[in-house]
Image: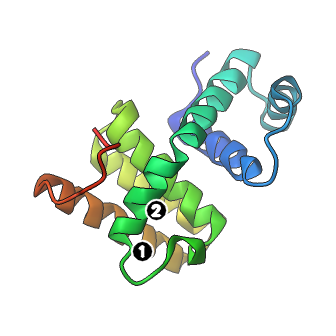
Amino acid sequence: MSLAWQKRREIILEVLFSFEFQKGDEKEIILLLMQEHKVSKKNAFEAYAAASEIFLKKECLDASISQISHSFDISRIHLVERNILRLAFWELFFEKKLPKEIIISEAKRLGSKFATKEAASFIHGLIDGLLKEKEKSDVRSTCLP
């Protein structure tokens, strides 16, 4: 059975956040995800694989976040918010499976759920800023398609 987009996104965020501290054994993490989230091995593996892909693109995604976040150095953005932004940017520019409005809405939801209401607004502002600059082709990052 396919995993709901919201749940998939939350699991990916959880794995991304854990990678900030230590990239543990894949099999152990997948088993833990299966137990904690009551998902199939296939769904846990897919979420883990997506988080791994995002983590591999971390430098590119962070460069894009830094370029848009004029008033905040990326190191000042909380880890949860930073990982929500990485996930949203990856979904927008690499995965491209959902409309941007849904991705923005989901990023705001994750910000409200796992950070603060203010974080949701901050996240929305950065995503909106990147999309506007991308439309004008002002984004200098060569790693974003």
Q: Nearer the viewer, residue 103 or 24?
A: 24
The residue lying furthest to the left in this view is 136
Give the answer, above or below, for where 53 lies relative to 132. above
Q: CA distance from mark 1 to mark 2?
A: 7 Å
Give the residue at mark 1: 121
Give the residue at mark 2: 108
Helix, strand or loop status at disc 1: helix
Is residue 124 visible to us here?
no
Q: Residues within 10 Å of mark 1 (few under 14, many from 20)?
A: some
Q: Position of residue 124 (x, y in %)?
A: 37, 66
Asked if marks 1 and 2 touch (Cβ < 8 Å), the reply is yes
Disc assigned to residue 52: none
Q: Quadrant of the C terminus?
A: top left
Give the answer, above or below, for where 75 lies relative to 56. below
Q: Residues within 10 Å of mark 2 (few under 14, many from 20)?
A: many
Helix, strand or loop status at disc 2: helix
The amino acid type of the residue labelled 2 equals Lys
Sequence-earlier tag: 1 or 2: 2
The amino acid type of the residue labelled 1 equals Ser
